[in-house]
Structures are given as C-alpha cells and as structure tokens.
Amino acid sequence: MDLIKRTFTAVVLLGSLFVIIQYAPDWVFFLAGLAFVLAALFEFYHLTGMKGLGPEKALGAAMSVVVLLPYYFRTIPLEAALFAAVLAAGVFYLVAVRTPEKLALFPASFATTLAGVLYIAFPLGFVFRLRLEEGPFLLYFLAAVVFLGDTGAFFIGKPFGRHKMTPIASPNKSWEGSAGGFLFAVAGAVLARVLLLPEVPLLTVVLTGLVVHAAAQVSDPLESLFKRAVGVKDSSNSLPGHGGFLDRIDSLILAGPLLYFIVKYLWR
C-alpha cells in the first residue's frame, strides 16, 4: 500500500510539474512555484514552532511574497524587496509585542520568521529565474543532477556505506554513498547535455554537475537538522509516501541558486 501511494503521488506530482515547467505561461509557473514555496515555508515554521520559537507564519508568508516578486517583475530591485520585508517585520513586532510574555518570545520569533524567508523563499527564487530567463531545459538539467545523484547515493550507500557522512543530520548517509551520488550526478548531467544542451561543452557540463550536486549534498542534510532537532522523520505528511513539500525541495534550496549563478556568470 505504501508503495502504491508513493508511486501515485510521484506520478501526479512529476506529471503536474512537467506540464507547468514545459508548457505553462510564465505567470502560471510563477504562481505555482510561489504556492510550492509557501507550502514549504509553513512546514519550516511548523518545525521551528515545535521547538517553541514562535514564528509568525502569516508575516513570514507575506514577507516571502514580497521577496519573490522581483524574480518575476524584474523592475523591482531584489535588495529593495528584502529591505521592505525586514521593515515590515520591524513594524509588525513593534506593534505586536505589548506584554512581557510576548517580549520574552520576541528574539526567537523575529529571528525564526526572518530565517524562513532567507532560507527558503530567497534562494528558491533563483530557481524561478532559471526557467523565466533560460527556459525549461536548465530545470531538467538541475533535476537530473540532483535527483539522479540522490538515487546513486542511495543505491551505492545502501550496500556499501561504511563511513558515516553526517551522523547527526542524516545517519544513513555515508561517504561511499556520496561518491556514488557524484557518479550518478555526472551521468545525469551528461545525459541532459546529450538530450537538451548539446551546445554546452562537455567539460563545462561535467564540472557544473559536480559542483551543483555538492551543493545538494549540503542542502539535504541541512534541512534534516531541523527535523532531527524536533524528532520527526518528515517535514509533514502532505505528499503521501513522500513526506512534505520541504522534503521534496530541500536539495534545491542551495543547488538551484548555485546553478543559476554558474550559468549566468560562467557559462556565458
């Protein structure tokens, strides 16, 4: 039954994402991505709330929308949006903190609310820009590098893993699995080049795949630290058999922006 649920969820999710990435107008893609980011953001706030940090979910969501607008409306400066979000947080807390009890929670609440925006919304906006500026093929390249790399890490690490890589964050991850992940990531990068990006030099593709997957190997256990801190396996049960939205995009939080910067400043 779990396998059936997992497979059904994967087919629906991947099919929907493919249609949106490949065919949807830019504004539909942006709104769909915004909904995904906000879902992940609420899961992050739920995790930190379990530690009594008191994030302001509605405020964080509003700040995230403000921060993400420049990724679609390029006339809005990103730094201005970030400042506006911080300014809004300052005004909100000055108005809201009126009792000694709220004052005691203020530092953790303020920091956690801002952390959600900077950790999730701000970096994932660059994944939007990959599609909006470069088209869908680089998102497929990113998916091939990250998700095939994860697959390789699992299939190599499961039978051969002996040396723990991040024992606190992800006890099952091993250095052997990490090496397998890099091999599969390079294979995914080369496959994506053959099918989608033949104009990009092979060495460039291989080096990009290695670096981007390295970022993914940091991004995944980083998200796991939040889950381990509160003693849960998944960020939520929103996606049957696959955990939560944050679980599905954790590797992209650092890998996506890095690919964007590499393409923008080094591929040209």
Image (cartoon, rainbow, N blue to C red):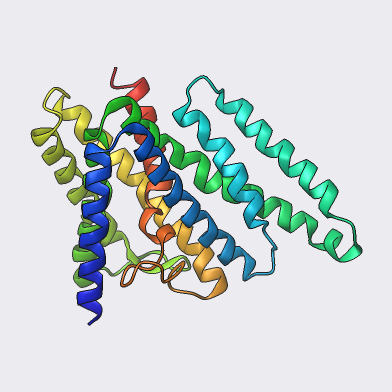
Badge count: 0
The image shows residue 40, relative to residue 21, as above or below, that is below
Instruction: Estimate the x, y position of residue 106 in percent, counting from the top left.
Output: 79, 56
**Quarter of the image containing the N terminus?**
bottom left
The image shows residue 213, relative to residue 156, as above or below, that is above
Would residue 142 be found to the left or right of residue 119 on screen? left
Q: In terms of depth relative to the viewer, which is nearer, 23 or 217?
A: 23
Residue 79 sits in quarter: top right
Q: Residue most toward the left?
A: 194
**Quarter of the image containing the C terminus?**
top left
Instruction: Estimate the x, y position of residue 114 in percent, counting from the top left.
Output: 65, 47
| Residue beneath the point at 67% across and 58% down | 55
| Residue beneath the point at 24% across and 62% down | 10
The image shows residue 222, relative to residue 32, as above or below, that is below
| Residue beneath the point at 26% across and 29% down | 135
Instruction: Estimate the x, y position of residue 98 in percent, counting from the top left.
Output: 89, 57
Would residue 144 be found to the left or right of residue 49 on screen? left
| Residue beneath the point at 22% across and 46% down | 18
Would residue 137 be found to the left or right of residue 126 on screen? left
Query: Visible in this render: residue 266?
Result: yes
Query: Visible in this render: residue 145?
Result: no
Instruction: Estimate the x, y position of residue 157 in percent, counting from the top left.
Output: 24, 66
Q: Residue most toward the bottom?
A: 1
Q: In terms of depth relative to the viewer, which is nearer, 93 or 167?
A: 93
Q: Residue most toward the top?
A: 268
Residue 265 sits in quarter: top left
